[in-house]
Amino acid sequence: MCFLNKICGMKNLVLLLFIFLILNSGCSTLHNSAKEFLEKKSYQDAINVYQEILESDSSDEKALIGLKKAQLGWISQKLIEVRLLRLSGNHNKSLNLLLEVYNRQNLWGVFPFGAVAFTQKEETQFARTSVIQVVNEALKENKPLRAQLYLDRYNSLFQPLKAQNQFKDLQLAVRKSGVKFCSRAYSALKTDQYYYGSFIKNLCQIWSHKNPNLKKQVMHIHGKLYSNVNIDFDIPNLPEPVAKNITDNFKESFKATPWYKESAKNSLNISLKGEYFYKHHKTDETLKHTYTVSVPYEKKYIKDKDYERDKPDFLQAMDTVFTIANAVASLSGDYKGSSSYEKDNHDGTVTVYKTKYYDETRVTSYSALKHTEEFKGNILLKSTLWGDAIEISYDMEDRNISVEHNNNSPKIGLTPKKADLIGKNEWLHILTKPLVDRLNSHLVAAWDTKFCESDFDYENTQQPIESMFRCLKVRKQNVPLNILSWFESVHGVSYNEAHEVLGEII
């Protein structure tokens, strides 16, 4: 027994050693890959591999040293790219790549030294000069939003004390320019320019400009939008709770459209006219239920008496275990495998009788009650939006059949069941739901058509500017080209860059 314990102990030790070798081999392979990437100056790949190693073992000293080398190599490599981009005249890409270098350094806590640090210092000085030049040009062109964009985006390039003083001077100049721009923009606002006024208000908050309220513009838009929905029902015998639920659904859904404003004066009047037919009847039914049972049958064969004695000891022991387990399972009703007994033939053989089972499909009939619901309805929605008539209709015809019974025979999978009824009220909700969705789609499309599809020269008139910003209520993603051009021409920034500074356009 002691000898066996020693063997088992040795086996466990070998197994542990084997696992250790596999794991160590995996780490060794990753270290070799990272080293190859470093030698090839594929620094980003090396960084990725070292980070993978450290995810498994954060204290791997070799990986920590290698990661720092790879990060310093990446910084050095990118600074050379920054210089080449600048020398080729691609200042924007050069600036953005230098900004990424700064961001990575702060993220990693790794900073260059020696010649690499000198290169970074030199490129940063060129970059600051470039940013200052862009800001000053934007201020001369009366485009403070462009100047603000560059200050916000590249402020990390002004870290030294002397550069910070430069940055503060630039901030002050941009703020003065922004305040002047806002004063002119506010004085030029027309009464009907509420959405454009909202954009100007958001923009001017950047420079802490004292925002006058848009009282005239707000009063104007309040007279054009809707705060509520009124529904006039012309549907005979419509239950009051159903009418209220339909009204609530229309009101809540309407809030998601651009025509809604909580403080507006108007209500959108909607007429719903229609009729419906609902019938529910029951019939006695005899239904069939299919189930499966296990049917026993006997199988026999002859074998030598000496067969069991010839079996190895461990097989005989296993047979005994299985026999006991099957006996216990059969007592609990969980086991339906084979059982057997033997009969001596007195000629050196025995006849073995085994009971086995096969699955047999059976069918039983039972009484049930069949429920049939029939529904037919049509409804017409009418409304008027800014003088334009809206008319939407929807028809529906359907039936629902469900069964109810009290039969309880769980052994064959048959248990009592209640009828799954839809009901008249729910069907009325189903009938009106498409109208709610279609009305909302219609309202969004009407807004889009009115304000997004106009082709105009925004430099010659003020009114189309308001249309552009109204369009942005429904076109935050697929922004029309004329709006994109307006941001580039008037403010010197792209639409996405304006988002970068403002967060929200309106």
Image: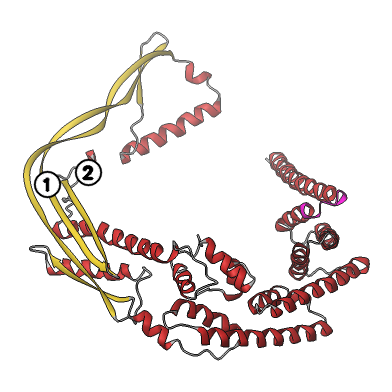
Residue 43 colored in magenta in the image: yes
Q: Label 1: which residue? A: 372
Q: Which residues are magenta?
A: 38-45
Which residue is located at x 51 percent, y 84 percent? 188
Residue nearest the observer in this picture, 484 or 58: 484
Please, what secondary structure does the residue beneath circle 1 have? strand
Amino acid under disc 1: Thr
| Residue 410 badge | 2
> Taking 280 as reference, is 156 above or below it?
below
Which residue is located at x 50 percent, y 60 percent? 478
Residue nearest the observer in this picture, 140 or 479: 140
> Taking 502 as reference, is 420 above or below it?
above
Q: Position of residue 74 (x, y in %)?
A: 82, 59
Q: Position of residue 281 (x, y in %)?
A: 7, 48
Place residue 88 in its image quadrant.
Answer: bottom right
Place residue 446 in its image quadrant.
Answer: bottom left
Q: Position of residue 461 (x, y in %)?
A: 50, 74
Q: The N terminus appears in which quarter of the rendering?
A: top right
> Taking 504 as reference, is 300 above or below it?
above
Q: Judge the density around disc 1: few (<14), some (14-19), many (≥20) Cα neighbours within 10 Å.
A: some
Residue 439 colored in magenta in the image: no
Residue nearest the observer in this picture, 420 or 479: 479
Q: Earlier in the sequence, mark 1 or mark 2?
A: 1
Which residue is located at x 77 percent, y 56 percent? 47
Amino acid under disc 2: Pro
Task: Examine the rendering and report whether any part of residue 476 can be seen.
Answer: yes
Q: Main secondary structure of the magenta part?
A: helix
Please, what secondary structure does the residue beneath circle 2 have? helix
Task: Examine the rendering and report whether any part of residue 155 can be seen.
Answer: no
